[in-house]
Each structure stands twice: as structure tokens, then as C-alpha cells.
Amino acid sequence: MMAKPQKTQEEQQSSPQMAAPDGGWGWVVVGSFFVSSALVFGLIRCLGVFFVEFVQYFGESAQAVSWITSIGLAMQQLMSPIGAAASNVYGTRPVVMMGGFLSGLGFILASQATSLLHLYLTMGLISGLGWALVFTPTVASVMQYFTVRRSLAMGLGFTGVGLASFAFSPLFQYLVEVYAWRGALLVLGGLSFNMIACGALIRPLGRPEVVLKTENLTKLNKCSSLLSRIFESFELSLLSHRGFLTYAVAITFFNAGYFIPYIHLVAHSRHIGFTEYQAAFVISVTGVVDIMGRVASGWFSDLGAMTPLAFAVVPEIVGIGRVLGALGLLQLIESVGGLLGAPLSGWLKDCTGTYTLSLIAAGSFLVLGMLVTMTLPYFWSCTAPPPPSPSKRKSQDGSIEDGLLKKTLSSNSVPESLCPLDDTPYSDKELKVCWKSDVTCLVQERDEIPQEMMHHTNSGEIL
């Protein structure tokens, strides 16, 4: 039997990700996520303050103005796979920093808008793309740093959304009164640039698993197509994962109804007689309740209960190794709900003259999402579901490269036994070397097999 070769420097650099430390620098990443979530979803929640201003300034319908926030939200979710794939290739830190820059740039350009179309392109497309590059990679970074206390860490990070909802709504109303909506958007652009610093604080635990797969696959097969690389980078095999698709449909319904109150609640409050600051304070109250709910749900979910934190459930469904691509695909699918929910509620307001039916529609979407969630495996269980097994993943992916790479390039051990060649569809110049611990086989040329490996197998047959 040959001596085990030493790992080369290149193999050491391409080692899998380190185990989650459940603390340490992870709490700094949680702090970065706290600020980022505040400047993404906390800001989106409070854009309802500008809703009334835009309706009055441009003289457009509620449905037309609702598209501003809906396009931004849909872009954030639709382009999340791009953010996930870019993080897999270039790393999380530069991607998040670029996203912070685009977010601020969109608001600065929006301050010079002369029509709703300009706001669609700036606040919608540019800032929305920036949010996509910030949010998903940052969430995945937090998940990679925590295992036991993952839901608690996610709950603490998401409290930034609640605090921002509490503080931003009256702050934005004050900025609109002092600087008008154009000056207020300039301030929002400056605030968004702080996400560049948040991205600089993210320290990856190791090279992404998808990068290792594509690099190792290239070493084995230099003729691998670009399509296969895209398939791996975007984790498209999850589209055949029943649990993931069920959860994505549920989140789409949640997303359709979740943001409707935040977009129209200020306008609804002013419609029924509230002053500007009273209407803004309604959003602040929802922020306080949101903080308590997120921390409490994160705490209880670590005890094994079903968490309402949507993103914390994803690793339990697909596994932590695929969480970055899963988050991107999840938000791409749910972008349908984010894009259509608010315009639908605006259309209902234009038809009825009140926001009552719009809020009822929002609640109906949330109920539908809850019913779909109840069909998930292990939903009614009081214990945590078992982690996705590697064998199950292979059967779902239908990918032979996974097992191939796992044993040939991540391990330097010599195979303990060789398989007989009877009844194999390979030519005389090929040798099939099977690993006991895996069902996948590696095909090598007979001429490349060292002489030391040409011995009797366990079955007694001579190679």
C-alpha cells in the first residue's frame, strides 16, 4: 500500500469551510448585519412617508406610485441569485461593499427625478440591485458563523429592521418638512453608504463550497461547459427540491402581503384624519413590536420550536453548505409577491377610495402563506428536523460530480480496496476504482495507475 501523499499548498488553500464557531468574530458579523438590515428593510418600511409626497407632487394614482417601492423590493429579491453567485466567485466582502455603493447612488440620483419613471429607474432598479448585493450575502455570512445559536443570531441581526422602523419614520417626516423630499432622499443616500463599511467587516470562514466544486471539476474535466458552472454557482438543483419549493411558495404569499401595510399605512392614517407625525408614529409602534417579536422568536426557535424567522429555516431544509444559493433562489421566487402586492393594494384603493380592502388583501396573503407552510415536512414536530443527508442530496441533485470531488480532491487517502471489473461498461484501458464509503466511482486510465495498486482485491480477483 502506498504512503499517503502530503497535501499541497493549493489543496490546503482550497479546503472546505471551517466549522461554525458560534461566536467570536461572528458577533461582529451580526453587528454588520444589524446595520445592513436596518438600511435595507428598515428603510423600505419607512418609504411610505414619501408615498404621500410623491402622489401630491407628481399628481399620479396610488397604484402608479406604489410601483416605486415594489420595483425596488422586487429587484432586491429578483437579483439575489446574482448576489449569491457573485459572492461564491469573488467573496462576500467586495460584493456587499459594491451593493452599499449602488444603494446610496440610487437615492442620490432619485433626488433629481422629474418623473415617476426616473424614480422607477433610480430608487427601484439601482437601489434595488444594491440591496440584493448586500442582504443575501450578509445573511449567509451570519448563518455560516452560527449553528447552535443561529436563530438567536438572526433574530438579533434582524432587530435592526425594528429599530429602524421605530426611528426612521418620524426622522424621514422631519427631513421632508425641513429639506423637502429631494433633500431627504440625499440624506438617505448618505445613510446607505454606511453599508460599505458593514461589508468591510465581513470575514469569510473559508472559500465557498460552490467555488471548490467548480474549480475541482475543471481539474478533472477541462472541457466542462460554462453551463455546468452556472448550474453549480446558482444551485439550480434546488428547483427539484420539494421542501425548498414548498417553502418558497409560502414565502411568496408572505411577501405579497407583508409590505402592503408599510407602504400604505401612513397614507391610510392621514386619510382617516391623523397628522403627519401621528401617521409616522404608527410605523414606529410597529417597529417596537417587531423588535420584541424577532428576539423572542429567535430565542424560542433555538429550543426546537418552529421559527417565524423565514431565513433561519433555510439551512434546516437544504443544509448549510447550500444556504447561499438557496437564499438567492428563494428571494428570486418570492420577488413575484413583492412586485405585485403593493400595486394590487394601490389599485384596490383607487377603485374603492379607501385602504380597507387593501389591508384585508394583505392579511389574506399572509393566511395563505401560513397554510402552505403547514405542509412542510416536520412542521408539526417539536424537535429539530434531521440535517439533510449527503445521499439524499445526491439523489435530488442527480450530480455525479459531488461524490467524485468529495473523495478524489478533498481526501488524499489511498483506496482500501478495488472493485472487480466484471460486467463493467468500460474499455480495456479503463479501470474503475470504487470507494467503500461512497457510491460514486472514479474512472482512471490503466496506464496512470501506480504499480503498487495492482494487487489482489478483497474479492480475490487480480487486477
Image: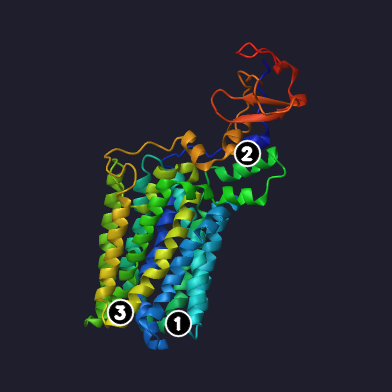
Q: Which residue is mark 2?
A: 13
Which SS class for mark 2?
helix
Q: Amino acid at mark 1?
A: Arg
Asked if 140 appears above or below 386 in the picture, the reply is: below
Q: Amino acid at mark 3?
A: Lys
Q: Residue 286 is drawn in which quadrant?
A: bottom left
Which SS class for mark 3?
helix
Within 10 Å of disc 2 (Cα), the crowding (few <14, some 14-19, many 20+) is: few
Comparing 456 with 291, the one in front is 456
Q: State the CA–CA distance, disc 1 to disc 2.
A: 49 Å
Q: Going from the N terminus, do you reach mark 3 or mark 2 first? A: 2
Q: Which residue is mark 3?
A: 349
User: Position of 216 compared to 108: left or right?
Assistant: right
Residue 441 position within the rendered picture, expressed as x and y whole percent measured from the top left? 61, 29
User: Does residue 330 show up?
Assistant: yes
Q: State the CA–CA distance, disc 3 to disc 2.
A: 57 Å
Asked if 81 appears above or below 106 in the picture, the reply is: above
Q: Which residue is mark 1?
A: 182
Q: Are marks 3 and 1 in contact (CB under 8 Å)?
A: no
Task: Report the mark closest to the observer, 3 or 2.
Answer: 3
Q: Going from the N terminus, do you reach mark 1 or mark 2 first? A: 2
Q: How is the image coloured?
A: rainbow
Q: Residue 336 is drawn in which quadrant?
A: bottom left
User: Does residue 194 show up?
Assistant: no
Residue 248 position within the rendered picture, expressed as x and y whole percent measured from the top left? 40, 54
The residue at 67%/37% (across/down) is: 10
Within 10 Å of disc 1 (Cα), the crowding (few <14, some 14-19, many 20+) is: some
Q: Going from the N terminus, do you reach mark 3 or mark 1 first? A: 1
Q: Are marks 1 and 2 in contact (CB under 8 Å)?
A: no
Task: Report the mark closest to the observer, 3 or 1.
Answer: 3
Comparing 278 with 358, the one in front is 358
Q: Amino acid at mark 2?
A: Gln
